[in-house]
Image (cartoon, rainbow, N blue to C red):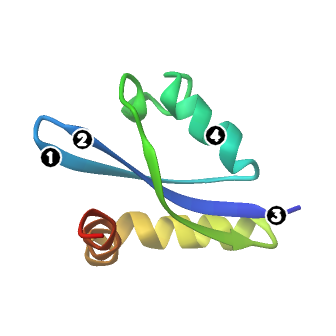
Amino acid sequence: MNFYVYIIITKRRNRHITYVGYTNNLLRRLLQHNNSKGAKFTRGNTWHLIYKKKFDNKSSAMKEEYNLKKNYYLRNKIKYKYLNK
């Protein structure tokens, strides 16, 4: 089974906010976030996928998710790359 680590973005109070997560069904998870059924942090906003990476197992995906959540420099680099297209 494949797992994905993803970053989604939304605009909240004139700031762009990102959220990092992992899932085995990326489309379903994005729909959950946009329908206020996802994580509590993501409720009430429209989210756009800006980054995804595929893994063969859950533990690798969870390690990458943890690294992305803690590495604000890399998250901001991905965010600004997306915003400056």
Say whether marks 4 and 2 touch (CB < 8 Å).
no
Q: CA distance from mark 4 to mark 2?
A: 19 Å
Mark 4: give few (<14), some (14-19) or many (20+) Cα within 10 Å.
Answer: some
**Image location of residue 51, percent across then percent down:** 49, 65
Q: Residue furthest right?
A: 1
**Alpha-carbon span between mark 3 and mark 4:** 14 Å
Q: 36 or 82: which is nearer to us? A: 82
Q: CA distance from mark 2 to mark 3?
A: 30 Å
**Badges 2 and 1: C-beta atoms under 8 Å apart?**
yes
Q: Residue 67's x, y, as percent? A: 46, 73
User: Which residue corresponds to the image point at 42% horizontal and 40% vertical from the top-left?
Assistant: 47
Q: Are marks 3 and 4 in contact (CB under 8 Å)?
A: no
**Dot 2: element:** strand
Q: Secondary structure at mark 1?
A: strand
Dot 2 and dot 3 residues touching (CB under 8 Å): no
| Amino acid found under the numbered disc labelled 3 | Asn
Where residue 46 sits, quadrant-wise, is top left
Q: Quadrant of the N terminus?
A: bottom right
Residue at 69% x, 38% y is 28
Q: Which residue is mark 2?
A: 11
Q: Which residue is mark 1?
A: 15
Name the residue that disc number 4 marks. Answer: 29
